[in-house]
Amino acid sequence: MNPGPYSASHVIGFIGKETPGYSAVVCRVGRPIAAAVDTGDGSNVQMVYFDDAEKHLLAEFIAGLPPEPFERLAEGIPVDEDFFVSHLVESQMQLGQCQPTFGARYKVAA
């Protein structure tokens, strides 16, 4: 998935009730636009935007993304805010820009 101008920074990983969780700052062109928290309890990512205009810009960007390919669904998985932000944080973890370890704080390069 192409993240476009979006990135994540200040990722903090922790152990949730059901899955690993995290908190992160979502950035657009390196500028913080929202705080994101995945509590690790199976619920959606919670977002707190610093500016309502940024919420609409992110929603428009996500609406323009094609479904994410998935072998069990020919039509793929539709991308929503929860999926996009989780993928943004997790893909940067997998690229080695931060490591998911309990209680540690990571600054991810934009």
Image (spheres, rainbow, N blue to C red):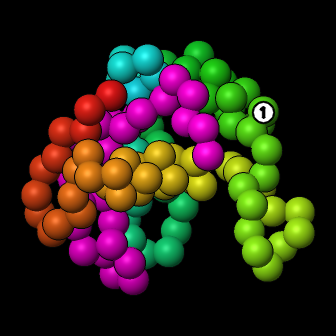
As drawn, which residue projects farthest toward the bottom?
A: 18
In this rendered view, identify the residue nearer to me: 26 or 17: 26
Reply above or below: 20 against 76: below
For disc 1, the marked residue is: 64
Q: Using residue 63 as the reference point, say whether residue 92 is left or right of it.
A: left
Q: Quadrant of the C terminus?
A: top left
> Where is residue 102 drawn, in percent x and y?
15, 68
For the point 50% across and 74% down, the residue is 42
Look at the image and give the residue range highlighted in magenta.
1-26
Characterize the magenta stretch by its predominant secondary structure: strand
Q: Is residue 66 visible?
A: yes
* Amino acid identity at mark 1: Gly
Furthest toward the left, the residue is: 104
Which residue is pictured at 69% across the width and 37% down the height?
62
Q: Is residue 17 magenta?
A: yes
Q: Nearer the viewer, residue 92 or 85?
A: 92
Is 57 situated above or below 62? above
Circle 1 packing at 10 Å, graded few (<14), some (14-19), many (20+), is few
Residue 21 % position (x, y): 33, 66
Q: In the visual, does 18 lie left or right of 62?
A: left
Residue 23 visible in rendering:
no
> Does residue 70 show up magenta in the picture?
no
Residue 83 location (% of width, % of height): 60, 55
Dividing the picture into quadrants, the one containing residue 104 is bottom left
**Residue 86 x %, y %:** 49, 54
Q: Which quarter of the figure has residue 32?
A: top left
At 36% from the left edge and 18% from the top edge, which residue is drawn?
31
Q: Nearer the viewer, residue 67 or 39?
A: 67
Residue in the image at 18% along x and 39% along y: 107
Apparent side of residue 97 relative to residue 91 in the rendered image (left or right): left
